[in-house]
Image (spheres, rainbow, N blue to C red):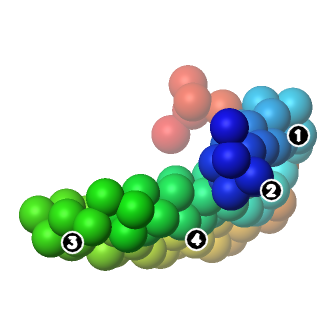
Amino acid sequence: MSPTHFTLSAAFLLGLTGLTFHRTHLLSALLCLEAMMLSLFLALSLWTLELNSTSSAASPMFLLAFSACEASAGLALLVATARTHGTDRLQSLNLLQC
């Protein structure tokens, strides 16, 4: 396993464990998701460069575009939650209430 592959895998796993164990605030969950998406983007970009293929050259940009859409939707939900509930703690959210 190369050091680059190990670093990207470790970054993804750290983001995943942060999302799993530190889910008290919505903002921390969004930051962990963004860390995971950033490590996936870097891994996909390096994989495309190593293969030297032009057919998969646009896939990192598509991933980055979807990641930006996910981040904007997450921040919109964060603002809406903070306005309605007064906090971004995930324990205060109840899915059974409207």
Sequence-first disc among 2 and 4? 2
Q: Are marks 3 and 4 in contact (CB under 8 Å)?
A: no
Q: Is residue 89 above or below residue 53?
A: above
Sequence-first disc among 2 and 3? 2
Sequence-first disc among 1 and 3? 1
Sequence-first disc among 4 and 1? 1
Label 2: few (<14), some (14–19) or many (≥20) C-alpha neighbours in 10 Å: some
Which numbered disc, 4 or 1, marks the residue closer to the eye? 1
Task: Determine which residue is flagged by label 4.
Answer: 75
Q: Are marks 4 and 1 in contact (CB under 8 Å)?
A: no
Question: Which is more toward the observer, 29 or 46?
Answer: 46
Question: Which is more toward the observer, 50 or 38?
Answer: 50
Task: Determine which residue is flagged by label 2.
Answer: 28
Instruction: Give the amino acid at mark 3.
Output: Ala
Whole-Å distance between the Cαs marked 2 and 4? 12 Å
Q: Which mark is residue 58?
A: 3
Q: Is residue 51 above or below residue 23?
A: below
Which numbered disc, 2 or 4, marks the residue closer to the eye? 2
Task: Determine which residue is flagged by label 1.
Answer: 22
Instruction: Give the amino acid at mark 2.
Output: Ser
Q: Are marks 2 and 1 in contact (CB under 8 Å)?
A: yes
Sequence-first disc among 3 and 4? 3
What residue is at 47 percent from the left and 65 percent from the top? 46
- In the rendering, at what x and y percent does residue 14 appear? 80, 43
Based on the displayed image, in which of its 4 quarters is residue 83 positioned?
bottom right
- In the rendering, at what x and y percent does residue 48 appear? 34, 63
- In the rendering, at what x and y percent does residue 84 appear? 66, 62
